[in-house]
Amino acid sequence: MDRIQAKKIVVAYSGGLDTSVIIKWLREHSDAEVVAFTADIGQGEELAPLDEKAKKTGASKLIIDDLREEFVRDFVFPALRANAIYEGVYLLGTSLARPLIGKYLVKHAKAEGADAICHGATGKGNDQVRFELTAYALMPEIKVVAPWRVWDLKGRADLIAYCEQHQIPVTATKEKPYSTDRNLFHISFEGGVLEDPWFEPKDEMFVMSTSPEKAPDKAEYVEIDFHKGNPVAVNGQKLGPVELLTKLNELGGKHGVGRVDVVENRYVGMKSRGVYETPGGTILHVAHRGVEQLTMDREVMHLRDSLIPRYAELIYNGYWYAPERESLQVMIDQMQEHVTGTARIKLYKGTASLAGRKAERSLFSAAHASFEAENVYQQADAEGFIKLNALRLRLRAQRLGK
């Protein structure tokens, strides 16, 4: 292959298998200075050793940004306000992190005077699209280097062999080749043994949650306060976004909540199998729905619900910085104006179920909904309502000769 033409390249660096190989590979196939960038979005790993590791493989320096607060506040919570869920089960943990990482790749490329950025996403996956759509939306002239689309390394086994050849320390092994990606919202598992959709994941694979079988035999209740669609307190204690999600991750993980196994449709066209742990996010999703039940107008809720698949698809496919996602967000956030209240969630053996909800400005009226005697609703009025709504059905039946 031809040598990469760039003066300076900023690499999205995790210190994992792919990006460890990439820095060394870039130094071999270009004359560019390589700057590594790591986003701290709650990986739960010690990031300090990455500086030495990045420099040993050829980076001139490593930049680490603590983006946990921004990630939860500006990416996770907006998606939560929309009840974003992809294909019925996936809460978009990885999808939400990529535009934030892409944003800072571009930011540091500008600050460093770099003419290119680089990522470790494969040519088969969604992340390449997410990173690059973000980059082009924020810096149209940027050059993107995607080694997986041009190098002669064919798979993870080749990468492990490359690391052994160049004495690059990595934790991946041939015996445990599946890929993981973790942030404060979730952890994902893909590849390796998981590529067989019939294979059941072993319990020792999971990181954020205990198995439901080993979870406590006694249920635990947690109360979550919301203000305008955002969670603001747990059990009456006001918490910032990072602390709140961390707390709920601990509670949900303790009770085995938030495990999902799905064969999903990637944007590039193929189906892929992913296993996810999203304990705190699962609790928040159930709780948010509970408060909405009391506080959202019926037609507003139904309209928003009709938009969820489209909104989630935009995030999954990498269009966070697209005008259609931004426009949808404005409307969704306006719809959340009155979503303020408290939900009580029961955690037990892998489930997070709604046990109660309350709100000062609730639209629920016990007087109107009661099956007992009351004077606020004239039941006889329902006859005309039904006949008017049945008119088109009766006319259709007459036309068909029924």
Image (cartoon, grey):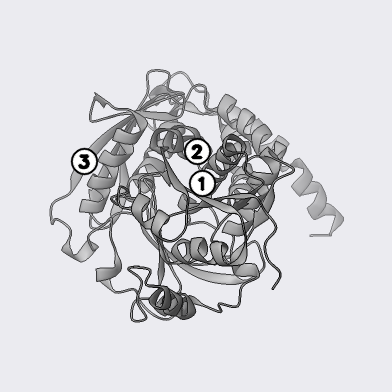
> What quarter of the picture does the C terminus occupy?
bottom right
> Dot 1, how many residues are within 10 Å of its Cα: few (below 14), some (14-19), or many (20+)?
many
Q: Are marks 1 and 2 in contact (CB under 8 Å)?
A: yes
Q: Earlier in the sequence, mark 1 or mark 2?
A: 2
Q: Which residue is mark 2?
A: 75
Q: Which residue is mark 3?
A: 221
Q: How many marks?
A: 3
Q: Going by the image, does 105 lie left or right of 133?
A: left
Measure the C-alpha gap from mark 2 to mark 3. Answer: 27 Å
> Dot 2, how many residues are within 10 Å of its Cα: few (below 14), some (14-19), or many (20+)?
some
Q: Which residue is mark 1?
A: 96
Quadrant housing residue 367: top left
Which amino acid, by three-letter code, is at mark 1? Leu
Image coords of residue 221 (percent x, y) = 21, 41
Q: Secondary structure at mark 2?
A: helix
Measure the C-alpha gap from mark 1 to mark 3. Answer: 28 Å
Q: Is residue 317 visible?
A: no
Q: Going by the image, does 386 lie left or right of 346?
A: right
> What quarter of the picture does the N terminus occupy?
bottom right
Q: Is residue 342 above or below residue 218?
A: above
